[in-house]
Image (cartoon, rainbow, N blue to C red):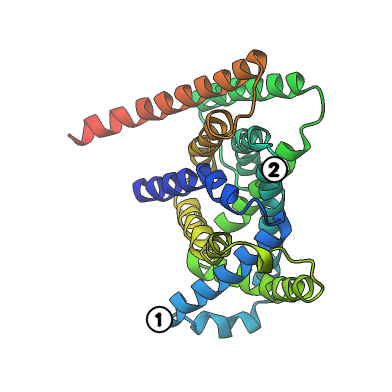
Amino acid sequence: MQIGILYATLAYVAWGIFPLYFHQVASVPALEVVLHRTLWSMVLLAVVLAARRQLAWVLALRRQPRVVAAFLLSALLLSANWVIYVWAVHNQHVVDASLGYFILPLVNVALGLVFLGERPRRGQWMALAVAAAGVLWLTVQTGRLPWIALVLALTFGFYGLLRKTAVLGAIEGLALETALLAPLAAGLLAWLTLTGRAAWPEADAATQAWLLVAGPITAVPLLLFAAGARRIPLATMGVLQYISPTLQFALGIWLFGETVQPARLAGFAVIWVALALYTVEGAWQRRPTSWARS
């Protein structure tokens, strides 16, 4: 449980500062960035698995079509999430993207309740109700359906559910996802390049270097997330998830100069209060056990 929380926390911190990376490749279209992320992640994972001689599971997949289908679905969900998120950062919607990841914990709790039979405690329900009120307030203040936030929350929520119930480990699962998408990514990137539609050949050396390191920058947080998701309840993942949007929100305001009206800021404050309530409730529940053991 504790190592799972550490893995998930590190993943969410990494995702929280992702806008800094995507700002470096802002001259490259969102879809093209995702194609590079897919290809270089696959290369990195293939090297790691080969070095560890951890390839026997690949042959077993021939007898497990349902496993392959499940990972194809998770790969498509992840790709959709990537494209929307990169597009949002490139088009000065970092704060809107952060709203999506503020909504995500509520989606996680709902999915855990419906598909996994998880039952949050009364204090957890209270914290989630406060968070839901904050999200509703933010939605009303926006004055329109927050499609960026909803797509990000739903795609990654279902992705997390699939990875939590997956039969493959963290690195094997991510390797299979990238391998399933790699032929499409390679073909599309080759077509864009040959037809002169690709931006990366004309990019400066720094941008090209940032694209080359997309593999580890993408794979490491996903491996940490998958390892954490298999060890802790979705409700706990939902609380830790607030780390990412809080960092994204701060970057959007202080670094990228996006503006937020005081009324919307109040909504974010309500969600932060909910996070504090959830954290205190969890610490209180652990206190009697720790005392008894001492």
Residue 64 in the image: state x and y as whole percent: 65, 77
Write the residue at 64% across / 48% down.
156
Residue 84 in the image: state x and y as whole percent: 72, 48
Write the residue at 74% across / 76% down.
190
Compared to residue 98, the image places residue 162 above or below, namely: below
The amino acid sitting under disc 2 is: Ala
Residue 71 in the image: state x and y as whole percent: 65, 66
**N-terminal label among 1 and 2:** 1
Residue 68 in the image: state x and y as whole percent: 67, 72
Q: Which residue is mark 2?
A: 88
Indicate the secondary structure of the residue bearing disc 1: helix
Write the residue at 55% across / 19% down.
269
The amino acid sitting under disc 1 is: Ala
Question: Image quarter for residue 78?
Answer: bottom right
For mark 2, does the 10 Å Cα neighbourhood hold few (<14), some (14 to 19), or many (20 or more) residues? many
Q: Front-most of 89 and 269?
A: 89
- Do residues under tags 1 and 2 come within 8 Å of each other at their CB atoms? no
Q: Front-most of 21 and 198?
A: 198
Q: Quadrant of the C terminus?
A: top left
Q: Front-most of 125 and 182?
A: 182
Residue furthest left in the image:
294
Q: Front-most of 48 and 165?
A: 48
Q: Is residue 167 visible?
A: no
> Which is more foreground, mark 1 or mark 2?
2
Q: Which residue is mark 1?
A: 51
For mark 1, does the 10 Å Cα neighbourhood hold few (<14), some (14 to 19), or many (20 or more) residues? few
